Amino acid sequence: MIFHPSLLVGQRIVVTGASSGIGRATAIVLANHGAQLVITGRDPQRLAATLSELAGEGHLARELDLDGSDAIAEFLKEITTGQQPLSGLFHAAGVELLRPMKLSKAQQTAQVFSSSIHSALALARGCALRGVMQDGAALLFMSSVAAQRGQAGMAVYAAAKAAIDGMVRALAVELAPRGLRVNSIAAGAVQTEMHERLLQGLPETAVQAYAERHPLGLGKPEDIAQVVAFLLSDAGRWVSGATWAVDGGYLAR
């Protein structure tokens, strides 16, 4: 354990996409540091598996369709009405798309944007409601190095993540009067099931070349989770409107 076990004691945090990958690893790390969690996902069995691994008590698992609708704000209002307001939110849910633009379909674009920026905006809208988040709380969204470096086949995904980074900067200013902090994490290649699906069908030479663009090698979900813990804790109280590169040196190239 890198941080003190009591780093997040007393904090109530929502983690989306907690049924697998980065969301799951982050939920486990946050719970190990004392946070009480509300975890969401689309697969009830995998979500229940994550819940069973969380240290501590009082955690809640809820199925939630992150479609960008007003139901997301209603969900946040529901889980905080008459209960402790949230002190943090980490939006880890998302879908991948690696496809040349000429082969992309409007439905695929809508799906990527819905799970990423549309849902992020809906979550932010809910968090801005009175009583949902305590003053001084933190919102954190997953972005990607794809928003800052061009790569063939990534136009739709990169556009969605670039929108996340722009949203973060605007919200950091808008929500500052309440002391709310808003940041994003530009992740490099992290070894998750989603990442493996993304690379399926690529030539081995292309996969190897992509890995070599990360001077410190490919990341693990826990590498992201530890940064999330820092940014959601009081240690990150003076960090807002920033996109943190957690990428094994990818953007340094």
Image (tube, rainbow, N blue to C red):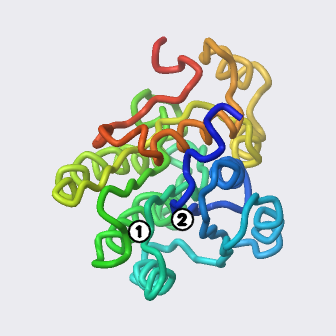
Q: Is residue 14 left or right of residue 160?
A: right
- The residue closer to the viewer here, 105 or 239, is 239
Q: What element carries label 2?
A: strand
Vertical placement of residue 19 versus 83, above or below: above
Amino acid found under the numbered disc labelled 1 = Leu
Q: Nearer the viewer, residue 72 or 210?
A: 72
* Residue 98 placement (x, y as % from top left): 60, 44
Check if mark 1's residue and mark 2's residue have beta carbons within 8 Å: yes
Structural distance between the alpha carbons of marks 1 and 2: 10 Å
Instruction: Tell me residue 81's x, y (percent).
Output: 43, 87
* Residue on which the image places disc 1: 123
Tell me if 190 is positioned left or right of 203 in this view.
left
Q: In the image, 235: left or right of 173?
A: right
Earlier-in-chain disc, 1 versus 2: 2
Residue 60 appears at what percent x and percent y? 66, 75
Residue 110 vs residue 121, the one in the foreground: 121
For disc 2, the neighbor class at 10 Å (few under 14, some 14 to 19, many from 20) is: many
Task: Report crowding for label 1: few under 14, some 14 to 19, many 20 or more residues within 10 A (C-alpha).
Answer: many
Residue tagged 2 = 14
Say what secondary structure mark 1 lies in: helix
Question: How many numbered marks, from 0 up?
Answer: 2
**Image quadrant containing the N terminus:** top right
Q: Of residues 93 and 110, which is closer to you in this image?
A: 93
